[in-house]
Amino acid sequence: MTSLMNNYARLPVAFARGAGSKLWDTEGREYLDFTSGIAVTNLGHAHPKVTAALQEQAGMLLHTSNLYEIPLQEQVAGKLAELSGLPKAFFCNSGAEANEAAIKLARRYSQLKHGAEKFEILTLHDSFHGRTLATVTATCKPKFQEGFAPLMPGFTYVEKELGKIEAAIGAHTCAILVEPVQGEGGVLPLGAEFLQGLRELCDAKGILLLFDEVQTGIGRTGQMFGFQSAGVLPDIITLAKGLGNGVPVGAMLAKEEVAAAFTPGTHGSTFGGNPLAMAAALAVLTAIEEEELLSHAVQMGEELQGRLQRLIEKYPFIIGVRGQGLLQGLVFDRPVAPLVSKCLDHGLLVLSAGEHTLRLLPPLIVTSAELHLGVTLLEEAIKETSA
């Protein structure tokens, strides 16, 4: 009998170690990891640069709190500003915390500028923004909200059409919050034209544009940030997952004017941006640049999508492939939960994204040979579940 709460439907495997794109369970069996810990281990497991940075930092200093200056925070913030074009950073511990911070900043900035009536945030159908009370309210998925009423006020859900979004903007609206690619919603890219339209709409209406880049950020789409492929600059973005390669770290980046709404005492985090987390983040950002992993992710993403496309041509119950970079979804006309389990039996780790979409998230370091093996194992599992 376990002492753990029963809020995870865990698959029957426990991992003992990892290296690159591979994991080994406690029995010594090898697996190819196409989940990256849900888009977290973007550099793969036990990356030498991250390992060395963590070992060095752990031997010096783990934590002091944000009561004091943390030089590594300045380094990581400066690097993120250079890469994103957003000059101010706040550090926390997770994607949900980063989205909470973005919600608070958007409301505070808007109310300081326009008055107390500016508090409403629009989010999209098929969205996912986290598990806290505010972020689960922002998430337009009833299954994540069941049993947690009353939800937070001030959120309105809209369909993914610019005309309907414009019609939904009212006197209380202060911001629009979207994911450039909706991961949990089914690997649904919003597209450059749509994101550009949102930027124009927000500018015209005098409201903020927030991008949830918790899953799409840190190279996952082949750009450092998902918004960069659309050629737009949001007012706020949120990051987590891949930023620490397994060390819990989140971040919110914002434009100078917007960030100024946070003054001492308005928001904080005890652990956020501590020296260990910042050492991991700096190592991740450095490795992505030095190893030219963005261009590699583009190349591998195109190859993976091509291999998945060939499966569509062979199996009529596979109805589409969609995604960006190394965030790819294979869409079926039936539930994919049995296929996720069957892939595990074959030594391949994959995820679902909604009921009918298989989500594949290989690390940015994945090789062409590993993609070939992964899709081969996937096809074997497909044949067995469809027999």
Image (cartoon, rainbow, N blue to C red):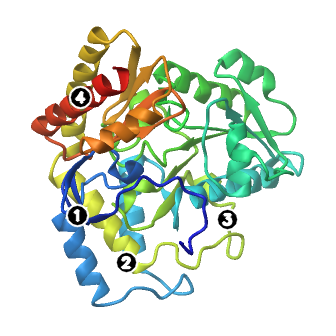
Q: Residues within 10 Å of mark 3 (few under 14, many from 20)?
A: some
Label 2, secondary structure: give it: helix
SS class, disc 3:
loop
Q: Which residue is mark 1?
A: 27
Q: Nearer the viewer, residue 86 or 371?
A: 371
N-term mark: 2 or 4: 2
SS assignment at label 1:
loop
Decide: few, some or many residues near mark 2? Use Cα within 10 Å; few <14, some 14-19, many ≥20: many
- Tell me which label, 2 or 3, sits earlier in the chain: 3
- Residue 254, relative to residue 311: is it above or below? below
Name the image quarter holding the C terminus.
Answer: top left
In the image, taking residue 171 as reference, residue 358 lies left or right, namely: left
Residue 171 in which image quadrant: top right
Q: Earlier in the sequence, mark 3 or mark 4?
A: 3
Amino acid residing under circle 1: Glu
Circle 1 crowding by C-alpha within 10 Å: few under 14, some 14–19, many from 20: few
Q: Is residue 295 visible?
A: yes
Measure the alpha-carbon separation of dots 2 and 4: 41 Å
3 or 4: mark nearer the eye: 4
Q: Measure the C-alpha gap from mark 2 to mark 3.
A: 24 Å
Per the image, the residue denoted by label 2 is 276
Q: Nearer the viewer, residue 299 or 227?
A: 299
Q: Residue at x 60, y 41 (%)?
A: 128
Residue 58 badge: none
Q: Position of residue 176 (x, y in %)?
A: 68, 37
Q: In whole angstroms, how far apart are the C-alphas of marks 1 and 4?
A: 23 Å
Q: Count residues near mark 4 (Cα–Cα under 10 Å), then give few for <14, some for 14-19, many for 20+.
A: some
Q: Amino acid at mark 4?
A: Glu
The earlier-in-sequence mark between 1 and 4 is 1
Q: Label for residue 380?
A: 4
